[in-house]
Amino acid sequence: MSDASPPTNPPDTGQSARQFFVFQKLLDTPELARFYTDLLIHSPTTVTAARDRQGFSKSTAYKYANALAELGVAAELDEYENGSALWRAEPVSGHWTGETTVELGPVIIAVYGATSVDDDLELFVDRHGKAALAPAVTATIEYLKGNTTRRSAADALDVPAVEGIAVTQAIERIIAIVGTHDPTLDDVTFDVDVHDRALDQAPYQRSDE
């Protein structure tokens, strides 16, 4: 009879598995990811307001709100605005380790969501695949931190300079709006400012608008 102790799971295994499932669902459906991002950055907000900002139909907006509630990342509050219930979304984040460690948070979700409305992101995915977006986000963060140039970011992504510049410009607009809601960026300081004109072209509205 073996004296070996039975294997035990880390106490947060269940939580990590749930977060991984949430990310899988959101990254599989860009429109759902976009709706989640809008709820998050404007929380608390109404489904109607989120629908209007993102251009969804009423039925689609409520379908996505209920889907987020089932995933445990959004909830309807017992508070109202103009007769409509307010909703609050919570940020989700986590680390997943395989050949490399990938840190996922709301910015990644927002970027994937924006592929359904941003031509530069859609073209980048068409040419290089969805998986290439995560390294593009990392490269853009390094650029905003002042650690690299756009052309160097393109070299790191192994894409033509014009594509690297376009995708980092598209992503930086999202980071500037969503970054303050992303726990994975809490300790990150950006040295490069994103101009208001660029933010006006972002797929998400600033929460102060």
Image: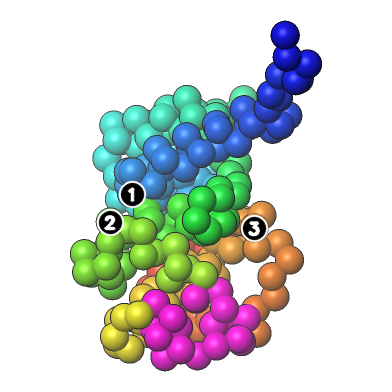
* Residue 56 image-quadrant placement: top left
**Labels 2 and 1: the sequence-earlier one:** 1
Q: Residues within 10 Å of mark 3 (few under 14, many from 20)?
A: some
Q: Which residues are magenta?
A: 139-157
Q: CA distance from mark 2 to mark 3?
A: 24 Å
Instruction: Look at mark 3 in the image and give the residue it sits on.
Output: 184
Residues 119 and 20: in front is: 20
Q: CA distance from mark 3 to mark 1?
A: 21 Å
Asked if one can make out residue 44 in the rendered structure from this viewpoint, the answer is: no
Q: Where does the image place residue 154, in percent across and percent down from the top left?
A: 39, 83
Residues 6 and 112: in front is: 6
Instruction: Look at mark 2 in the image and give the residue it sits on.
Output: 116
Cβ–Cβ below 8 Å for labels 2 and 1?
A: yes
Q: Is residue 118 above or below residue 94?
A: below
Instruction: Look at mark 1 in the image and give the residue it sits on.
Output: 30
* Residue 102 image-quadrant placement: bottom right
Residue appearing at x 31%, y 80% in the figure:
159
Asked if one can make out residue 33 in the rendered structure from this viewpoint, the answer is: yes
Q: Where does the image place residue 1, in percent across and percent down from the top left?
A: 72, 9
Verify whether residue 170 appears in magenta.
Answer: no
Residues 168 and 79: in front is: 168
Q: Where does the image place residue 144, in percent across and percent down from the top left?
A: 57, 80
Verify whether residue 153 appears in magenta.
Answer: yes
Q: Where does the image place residue 92, in percent across and percent down from the top left?
A: 58, 44
Q: Is residue 115 above or below residue 59?
A: below
Q: Amino acid at mark 1?
A: Pro
Residue appearing at x 29%, y 35% in the figure:
60
* Residue 198 image-quadrant placement: bottom left
Q: Provide the major secondary structure of the magenta segment.
A: helix
Residues 47 and 104: in front is: 104
